[in-house]
Image (cartoon, rainbow, N blue to C red):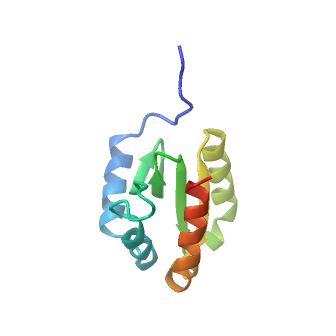
Amino acid sequence: MHHSKRIRSTTPEIAAAAKRLRKNMTIAEQTLWTALKARQLDGFKFRAQHPIGRFIVDFYCPACRLMIEIDGAIHDTQLDYDIARTEQLERYGYQVLRFTNDDVIHHLSDVLTTIRQTVTK
């Protein structure tokens, strides 16, 4: 029997937190979501503030197992946590791209080019 490598058991609390985050996206998250939603990026479906196990990722493309994280100032103080989290997600077969708020707000076309290159590999 084939078992997919997948993080399971998202709790109702995590799902509720994800819903709250979707309603309160940062400016950078809103900017990127406007470019990704409704299959605008080469027809790929993305989800915003998507729960995966005990994590909530900013954006997720199920077809590519790609997670996109937008890092604000808080991430400067939690680099070790972010690195450990990324490594754990990668062990489950997910690919993680990280961008800063500044990248998204001031260099959106470059961010979209990087995402496009990643999803079409």
Query: In this view of the protein, can residue 71 be seen by the observer?
Result: no
Quadrant of residue 119 in the image? bottom right
> Which residue corresponds to the image point at 39% horizontal and 68% vertical from the top-left?
33
> Which residue corresponds to the image point at 50% horizontal and 83% vertical from the top-left?
105
Tell me where residue 25 appears, x and y as whole percent.
37, 70
Tell me where residue 111 appears, x and y as whole percent.
56, 73
User: Is 20 rendered above or below residue 3?
Assistant: below
Q: How many numbered markers are drawn?
A: 0
User: Is 55 rendered above or below residue 116?
Assistant: above
**Which is more toward the observer, 88 or 35?**
35
**Which is more toward the observer, 23 or 116?**
116
Tell me where residue 100 appears, x and y as whole percent.
58, 75
Residue furthest out toward the bottom: 106
User: Is 67 rendered above or below residue 32?
Assistant: above
Residue furthest out toward the top: 1
Q: Is residue 8 left or right of residue 99?
A: left
> Which residue corresponds to the image point at 57% horizontal and 55% vertical from the top-left?
120
Q: Is residue 111 left or right of residue 11?
A: right
**Which is more toward the observer, 46 or 14?**
46
> Which residue corresponds to the image point at 41% horizontal and 75% vertical from the top-left?
26
Tell me where residue 68 appears, x and y as whole percent.
53, 60
Q: Is residue 41 left or right of residue 84?
A: left
Query: In this view of the protein, can residue 5 be seen by the observer?
Result: yes
